[in-house]
Amino acid sequence: MTDNPRPTAPPTGTHSHDGLLPPSRLGKDGRSLSAASFTSAKPAQSYTRSMNIPGSFAPELKSYVSRVDLSRTDSYGAIDDLHDSTISSEQRQTAYRDRIEKELKIKVGTENLLEALNAKNAKQAREQRKIVELELHTSNRKIAQLQSDLEAEIQRSKREHQQQPSSPKGRLSQLFRSAPLRSPSHLAEHHDRDEDEESGGHDMEVESPTYILGEILQALEAEGMPSDYYVGQANVLVELFKRHQTLKYDLAWSIFGLRMQMVMLSDSREVVAAGYRVMRYAITDRKSLQTIRALQTDYLVILSLVKESKARVEREQALKFIRAFLDVKGGEQEIHPAVARIVVAVANHPDDQLRGIALLTLAEMLLKHPKLVAEAGGLSVLSESMGNGAYSAPETLIDPFLHLMDLPARRGLLNSGFEFSSAFASFTEPVITNAQEDKLKASSKVVAALFKSWSGMMALSLHDFLPVRSIVSALYISSLPIRTAVLDLLINILRIKSPSWSSSFIGGRRLTTYGRVTNLRIEQQDSQGTTKQTVDDTQKRSLVQHFTAISLAVLLRQGLLKGLLLAESDSPTQALRRRTSLLIAEVLRMSSELLPSAWSFGLQTLPSLFTAAIDFRSDDRLQAVATVYQVDSINRTLYRSVSGEDAHARSQHADGSSAARARATSKAQSNATMDETQFRAKMLDTQILNTVNHTKWDWPLIRELIDGPMVNPKRLQEAMITSKMVHRLLGFLRPFKYRFSDASNTKANQRYVRTACALLKLLLETTEGAKYLESNKLVPQIGECLAQQDPMSGITSKTPLFSLERMSETLVGGYFAMLGVMCSDAKGMQILERWKIINIFYHIVELKDRDDLIRALIMEMDYTLDSHPRIILSKAMTATSKGMRITATKILRKYAMLPIEHASIIGGGAAEWAIKLLVSQLYDPEIEVCEVAIKILEEACNDISSLEYVVKCRPALDHLGEIGAPLLLRFLSTSVGYHYLDGLDYITKEMDDWFLGRNDTYVTIVEASLARALAENPEKPGPASEEGLDPQDFGCVPPHFYRELTRTVEGCELLKAKGHFEEFAANIQDFALEAEDPETILKVKGCLWAVGNVGSMELGAPFLEATDVVRWVVVIAEQSQVLTLRGTAFYVLGLISRSLHGQEILAEWGWDGTTNVMGESLGYVLPLDFNKLFAIQLASAGVASGKRDTTTTTMMVRSRRGSLVTDADATNTAILNAIVKLGNTVLTNKALAELNGYRAKKAPGFQKPALFRKAMGLLASHAYRIPQYRFVIDLFDKRVLANIVLEDDEEEAGKDGSEEGSGDSEA
């Protein structure tokens, strides 16, 4: 047999035609072929790699075949590689996914380039734009082809797996696809063994996970194998645990544990890391943790974590192994104090790469086992990390501390209350370097997090509000970074949403130019017509605003306004001065809206500023006058642009809306009066009359003419008849001109669609325009193209205009937007009926494979008129796929939100029609469709008239279960709904359900909602939900059964007859000051929310008066030592103040409420004696007992340490004493010298497991740093650990009976 000769590469610049090399050429799309497959290695080796004869051996293949070829799909070499039989299906799928990702990146870059070219001169960028558009089309085509090939490959792989039996080794590779592929050299070494296995034929046994597990454990017995071998086996074992979740419950730990011990005693860092990973996936419950710890894993973890940074893989897996304990119920109890100590040491090591994950682990341990972390010294480490900028998300570390603050029993672990002070120190330090600036930003996050929870507010009140005073005093520092950080922090704390004109104002523009912009924004908001007054407008954001009122009151009492005025007077920059002025105006506005009048009246006068302004002998008078003028100007502008989120300002907003619209349309009116000469000049400027090339037209000017002068019938007549402007615009839109219909579907080209819709709307407003449109070829051509998709029309085309590809790549989808504009007008409907387009719509909705076409149709139609589009939509809601039915149901939200009394005259009420359809959707067979309909109806029922109309429809919701409960709850707010539900026997059952358990669930819902709302940054709102179905009402009071019940007289009579309110009041009175039992505290919270919701209704006043429950709610708010319970009582008092009678009762108990100018309550209350609200005891009886426990533990540790430093051998005793001295910073050097001396003398104790155990016990009983840990452990022989782990009983039996109880790392 002769060897195959290796071909040689042709010289550079020549082409080979023997089939060995792919020719260098351009692809069909004009792009040069990628050479990724030829340049994946060194240039000198690339050609020879591609020319090896199949089956021949080349030494350089070792580094080549292991790489996946990422060349383009039109590269010959790449296709050949993918169809090579030696490449597995998994490799081909990976290659396809890589190519799809690459093409997607090319597509994104091409789209960005196309947008940039559209902004250039049309003539200069014409050729470039053609090339880029061709590139974009090619990318889309390639992505579609690659996705199709990938799907085909996946299906082919499944068929092969089902039909073709394979060898055990091949079967294993299919089971563990995500495991790393073996290198070619490894495959070559075990080729003979694979052939032997193929002849074995153990197919049935291999399919059993227990058999596979046995094979893997047997494979791990092999000694002397390379580390990659053990890592690969461990990875396969992990994949086995992932695929068979129940396998880990049946492990034989006597065998499995021994194998894992051998793996984790390996000298290879990667092998030890793989062992930790396997052990982590083998954890099931607390008992399994105890079994694992019996394998001496505590010692192993400590030894891994003290290693140097080059062993990062092993250290990271060891830390993940510790974190796995926290995922098991009760697993935190199995974390040994010595392990907690080493985690603290890692977190306290400034240069450790795992410091962040160690801090996060400590924080989680503090939540689940506070005492363990406190005894290990972790509190000080976490506290310091919150302010030193070492941790990237310091605000997350504050939550465990606030968890400790809540209950007095846990509060004792916080010794002084200064654990939060490190974050406040950054505001008084000079900022010189970038690191200090990062530290300042990190501290700002921590302080903001403290101001966003009730426990945090209580922590800020410690030591007479010292932390708050430090923040306010930072305003007196003129350093630019500190001043900027403090202003940002205050804006965040007070949840101030900057107005739209704030950035321009801070940049230096005058305020006089913002009136028109503000009025225009108001007019645009009014034109949407989706906002209407609801029965719950007074409840929106009540809890968040109430909490913000407390934050504002705390800051103002500590001198916020005085500090801001001083900061405004000596601001380092003009921009910062303007920003400070804006903040002063916002604070004054918020104080007038959120605080009682007794608080705000004194602030509005700005006494110190006015005193300086009228002091003519002072040089600062002019500056004070300027400040007064600036603040007044900002206040007036803020009043004009007040946000619609303020519920009490909406009525004022509505009163001035007509005047605002009149002012906003002044520009349009002036343009409409343009004379003939000016209009002709403008038409010439658009370039429409000069050229038919639409890329040269001035589209912004065209839109301006359509919205302005052409509103005038004379100007429109001139544009249609005298000139060719409208004719050319409609000609550009005609499908068979292939100008608009061939334009790419990009963001920049959407202006064509918007202009076309505006033009059609303008033409339909006049009779002449409608006739002109009817006589144009645009509509019949659109109808002909739509008929190509109608199977009943008989019209077909090889390349239909509305094909799936063209709908996604071109602007043909914009034709549906134009047809939607025509559907909104009666004259447009007549045109569509004339050309039979309406008939085509009916047939399109019946298509089974064109959801994209149906979606475009129903989403662009207008359903205001009672005409064919409504019938088409109702058909789409019942006869299409589930996704289409959900989309069609969401469309109804816009119309269901319309007020019933203001419905359109033509059609007799879009809101009624939408509500009827939504009620019919409640009987859809798919629960997802019903859920969407429920959400829309629930939102529509905020309006009383809509709610009554929904009840008239008498929907049956029994089949929906919990999904329909919120809507049924809404029905209770009217007498009609009450009687309807009473007839269904719903009220009695639901009332008993709430009384027995739903009240407790309500507590969780409202607390989670409030926490989410407070965590949100108003300057950076979250992404809006699709179709607005889930309004972001986090922080408002969720619907409560008893509140809805109290809205009607019938409901109040039922509540009185049942006696539930009296039960709630009795529970509150009996357990008002409960501070220990979590279940009782939860029950009291549920009773408080029920009382508050009943008291917020005017009809609930007799219940408050009869039970005197308000007195006990006030007691909880002022005296409870459970901080979250105190916060709940505070919010409940705000709810009670919403009723007039509730305000009177609260005034008797020393609480003052906020009202608007009409005397109506806003639901914000504050105590007249403000300090009562923040009176807490940092040390209580429970805390004292906790300190006694800590003292007892400390004494036990000291006594145990005393037993550890004693040994029968004097040398061993001296070594242990030296280790104790190592923890003393004064004696560290002496201890190091002594220990080094014993090491030089080769003390026999360093070979003994007994001394190692005692040394580890000493390390666990005191705070040591990582280098000290490493030094002590390196003193001992490496075989000591193996003896402890593997031969513990044999080595240590009978040697030292006292040592068994002294080892700190035993299970």
Image (cartoon, rainbow, N blue to C red):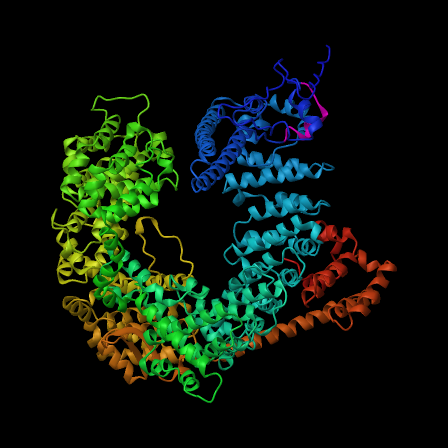
Of residues 1240 and 1093, the one nearer the viewer is 1093
Where does the image place residue 284, in percent across and percent down from the top left? 52, 49
Question: Which residue is farthest top?
Answer: 1
Where does the image place residue 248, in percent across and percent down from the top left? 54, 44
Of residues 300 and 519, the one nearer the viewer is 519
Range drawn in magenta: 56-66
Apparent side of residue 908 relative to residue 1246 in the rendered image (left or right): left
Point 62% across, 36% down: residue:
216
| Labels in figure, total | 0
Quarter of the image for residue 380 reads: bottom right
Point 73% across, 53% down: residue:
1281
Above or below: residue 1150 compared with residue 720: below
Question: Which residue is farthest front?
Answer: 677
Point 26% across, 60% down: residue:
993
Visible in this render: residue 302? Answer: yes
Above or below: residue 1168 compared with residue 424: below
Q: Is residue 681 magenta?
A: no
Visible in this render: residue 926? Answer: no
Above or below: residue 338 compared with residue 954: below
Of residues 942 and 1063, the one nearer the viewer is 942
Q: Quadrant of the C terminus?
A: bottom right
Quarter of the image for residue 1021 reads: bottom left
Above or below: residue 260 compared with residue 30: below
Q: Is residue 65 magenta?
A: yes
Where does the image place residue 967, in percent across and percent down from the top left? 23, 55
Of residues 1175 and 1067, the one nearer the viewer is 1175
Point 21% across, 57% down: residue:
941
Q: Quadrant of the N terminus?
A: top right
Question: Which residue is farthest bottom?
Answer: 617
Where does the image place residue 1220, in percent across and percent down from the top left? 75, 69
Apparent side of residue 1098 relative to residue 1240 in the rendered image (left or right): left
